[in-house]
Amino acid sequence: MRICEIMELLSAKPLTEDCDESLEVSCACASDMMSDVLAFPKEHMALLTGLINPQVMRTADMLDIRLVIFVRGKQPGAETMAMARETGITVLATPLTLYIASGILYLHGLRDGTKG
């Protein structure tokens, strides 16, 4: 699924300037616990979270996650966004809850990043 499709489905807005809307993701992981995200790395995975601290970007960079979606309209601070820019991670924000956003993406074919 392309980022432009995700933006439309979730009414999401880009928070990073260099948003490559044609970037493809093949699965997603939704968690506020970065230790859970570390347990299930997959290629081309998107991360949905309500956690907005710099640890999110450290985790995403370590797993080569190129898309982070912040839920509930949360706006990360300057340090988190600087890390996103430095690592080339695209960041979106959606007003939806983690549960609803995950369900919408799943219903439209984006599968669980924890499956082998």
Image: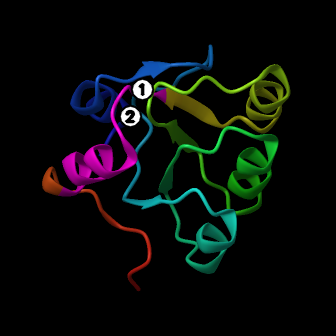
Closest to the observer, 103 or 14: 103
Question: Percent x, y for residue 40?
Answer: 55, 77
The part of the chain drawn in magenta is 93-106
Q: Quadrant of the C terminus?
A: bottom left
Choose the circle earlier in sequence order: 2 or 1: 2
- Element under label 2? helix
Q: Amino acid at mark 2?
A: Ile
State whether residue 108 is above or below residue 71. below
The furthest residue to the left? 107
**Res 101 quadrant in image:** top left
Question: Percent x, y for residue 79?
Answer: 85, 27
Residue that mark 2 sits on: 3
Question: Percent x, y for residue 89?
Answer: 66, 37
Whether residue 102 appears in magenta in the rendering, the answer is: yes
Q: How many marks?
A: 2
Residue that mark 1 sits on: 21
Are discs 2 and 1 less than 8 Å apart at CB?
Answer: yes
Near mark 1 (Cα within 10 A), the count class, few <14, some 14-19 or many ≥20, is some
Seen at 68% across and 27% down, the residue is: 76
